[in-house]
Image (cartoon, grey):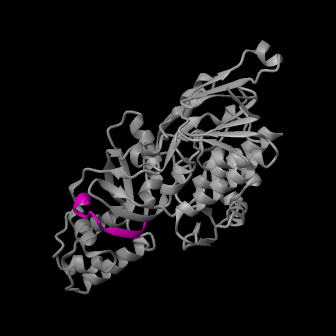
Amino acid sequence: MTEADLIVCGAGPAGMAAALAAATRGQRVVLLDQAGRPGVKILISGGNRCNLTHDCAAAAIAKAFGRAGGRFLGHALRERGPRELRAWIESLGVATKVEPGGKVFPVSNRAVDVRDALERELERAGVRFHGGAAVTAIERVASDAAASGAAPFVVATARGRFAAPRVVLALGGRSYPKVGTKGDGYGFAAALGHTIVATTPALVPLVATSAWVRELSGVTLPDVVLSLPAADARREPPQRGALLFTHFGLSGPAPMNVGGAVARELAGGVSSVPLAIDFLPNEERAALDARFAAATSSGDARLVRTVVGGLLPRRVAEALCEQAAIAPTLPLRQLSAAARARLLDALFATKLALVGTRGFDFAEVTRGGVALEEVDPATLQSRVVPGLFLAGELLDLDGPIGGYNFTAAFATGALAGRSAAE
């Protein structure tokens, strides 16, 4: 049996940050992962470019996780917020840049550069990494044995057994199971006494069966607003960003940002979730209505599809005309007040039934996980199991696209590792 001061289960962003935080404080750290090398999920993040974080203050990161999540993350973000994270990565030799919209990437646009730098730092810090060591069980040593000097935790893996007085559990969620994140950590946490909030995919593309959506496959709109009329507006605010029509439904930042809410609604047993799409967030409905009315009364001979096509791509304009039951070739002068109202509804509040998501295979993160109230936010030590620390996607935390979730993973990992070393 291999003994250490700290065992870190999971070598994703949170696990690597935890291992490094503890090792640099003189701890003998063992880092375990089912993959042959650490940081596999980093390699596929951000389109293989690794969206490390967001160019904003720590308070903005916290706010993106909602009231409960943001309050929980406060201590971790003070440990390593977005600016500290960027400086840390640059100190490891990886130059970074800020792209329009605030996303932070390595200048090289290569996620592998981030992974390799962290791997080198693990080696320099003396972290003992064991690849191919999928965790199969985490056992607590009986109190009488612990009193006699035995380590209170034994972690069983495919590569042997490891013992330590403290464990960081950072095995990730259920998103992208092809890289090994299949949700095993939830079972270990539950077996140790933790409550697991039901997990669903988040940051995930949406499935719609409407023919007009699929016919627009390949069309991208850079700026729309999506909202879920049936959802609690305080929990699920509208999402603004780009939208991509696909053969299965909708993808892109705005649809994926509502994916977690849609998945949770569907998990509740409903057959579909209504989505409202505002295709013209920079236009005012009343002002556009007045323009249409003026053109109609002046005898404007232009076709409706031509006028709407000045606002949106031609294919989208024609599809929305059809959704409003208006012939795209109708002259604007013949547009009735009732038809004009239907057209404005289509432009500013098209209703679409969502029947599913693309699931965990295509989700970037997991919604749900270890209940936050069972973890001390100041240390990330379990309130249920002394000596156990939890970090990363395993926790019931999920934020929007844009580097927010990686920031939370690195931050919670750093705090868990430092706390475990104290």
Q: Is residue 354 visible?
A: yes
Left or right for 225, reference 130: left
Report the residue at 31% width, 81% height from top: 310
| Nearest the eye: 154 or 54 | 154
Relative to 344, say whether 156 is above or below: above
Q: Residue 117, position in %: x, y? A: 63, 60
Relative to 382, say whether 278 is above or below: below
Relative to 291, say whether 13 is above or below: above
Residue 28: quadrant of the picture: top right
Farthest-out residue, top: 144
Report the residue at 56% width, 33% height from top: 185
| Nearest the eye: 342 or 207 | 207
Q: Residue 66, position in %: x, y? A: 61, 49
Q: Is residue 103 visible?
A: no
Residue 49 colored in magenta in the image? no
Left or right for 6, reference 207: right
Q: How many marks?
A: 0
| Nearest the eye: 179 or 272 | 179
Q: Quadrant of the C terminus?
A: top right
Q: Residue 373, position in %: x, y? A: 68, 34
| Nearest the eye: 210 or 31 | 31
Residue 212: quadrant of the picture: bottom left
Q: Quadrant of the N terminus?
A: top right
Report the residue at 69% width, 63% height from top: 92
Residue 220 colored in magenta in the image? yes
Residue 152: quadrant of the picture: top right
Task: Specify the segment rendered in magenta.
Answer: 213-224
